[in-house]
Amino acid sequence: MWSWVAHRITGVGIFFFLLVHVLDTALVRVSPAAYNEVIGTYKNPIIGLLEVGLVAAILFHAFNGIRLILVDFWAKGPRYQRQMMIGVGVVWVVLFVPFVIRHLSHVFGG
Amino acid sequence: MTTPEIAQPRSSTRAVSLKGGGRNRSGQTNFELYSWLFMRLSGLALVVLVLGHLFVNLMLGGGITALDFGFVAGKWANPLWQVWDLLMLWLAMLHGTNGLRTITNDYAEKDQTRFWLKALLITASIVIVVLGTLVIFTFDPCLDPSSTLSVCSK
Ligand code: HEM
């Protein structure tokens, strides 16, 4: 149940981020200066932390999504619900931790 | 003791037994089935497209500190990244829009509200997909005549 709620919330969050992300990237058609200026305003600790949250959400949605797909299409999927949920958690940690270390060292000027 | 036979969800035998007519009886289409399948197929493709995108842009090289116009120009000089980004744009937007359509159907109870929310959703999505597609196809690394990028000096 909670994983379904989290899948929804992360899905919606990623979608609205994507709308803004296409808009900011579209500035490359306006001028290099306009693009660089807006991307420049993203390079601060607050946005840096929001990016960490975004990646956390994407990683959860992606691997929980794979779990949902396996439950639906793999004959033994429903039987291994619990194991797969743990798998989602493990993969999430394994990818998230290196990301946070690398990203925050960029954000906080490593 | 015998195990009762349980049909696969959405299998036609189940539909027959539940509704006594199969899925495609008059006025019903397979739209929701295809939409369900699309969410799963696009999801699988997006794992590679989105995680690859994040890895190349945020983990390799200088990560976020290296992102600027020149970085974008460098990536889109390669047709692989143009196709990658185009596919990612279309699949993520269709997947996300379809997901929000489901959520709207779930929570907006009044017909009017549902209609207008979905109209807004679809309008916004079309604008973003068209804009994003145009940006990828019409990108010009030498937009600024005084550009110092190497591709612009002949
Ligand atoms: C990274 C790979 C992704 C995978 C594996 C994935 C997987 C899935 C799956 C399987 C569903 C269907 C859930 C269901 O039918 O019950 C779903 C729903 C959804 N996804 Fe994704 N997705 C991914 C990326 C994205 C992205 C990039 C967005 C946003 C643009 C997004 C937004 C949504 C939304 C809004 C829903 C609807 C949630 C609901 O109905 O509760 N997903 N995802």
Image (tube, coloured by chain):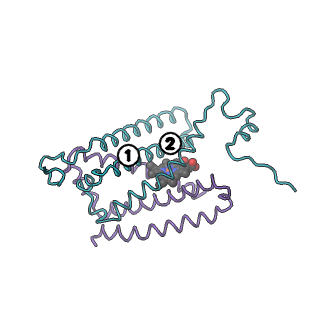
Image x and y of residue B27, in percent: 63, 27
Image x and y of residue A45, in percent: 31, 65
Residue sitting at x 42%, y 60% = A55
**Residue under label 1:** B86
Let me know if residue A8 appears in the view.
Answer: no
Q: Which residue is outermost to the top?
A: B26
Which color is chain B depicted in? cyan
Element type at mark 1: helix
Residue sitting at x 13%, y 51% = B153
Image x and y of residue A22, in percent: 34, 47
For residue A50, above or below residue B20: below
Seen from the viewer's position, the closer of residues B123 and B14 is: B14
Query: Residue A77: which quarter of the image?
Result: bottom right
Q: Residues within 10 Å of mark 1 (few under 14, many from 20)?
A: some
Residue sitting at x 35%, y 69% = A102
Element type at mark 2: helix
Let me know if residue B45 appears in the view.
Answer: yes
Which chain does the purple colour mark?
Answer: A
Image x and y of residue B34, in percent: 57, 40
Which mark lies nearer to you, 2 or 1? Answer: 1
Q: Which residue is outermost to the bottom?
A: A110
Tell me if the residue at label 2 has its CB under 8 Å from ligand 1: yes
Quick one: quadrant of the N terminus of chain B? bottom right
For residue B52, above or below residue A99: above
Q: Is residue B152 left or right of residue B112?
A: left
**Residue under label 2:** B98
Residue sitting at x 67%, y 59% = A76
Which amino acid type is marked by label 1? Leu
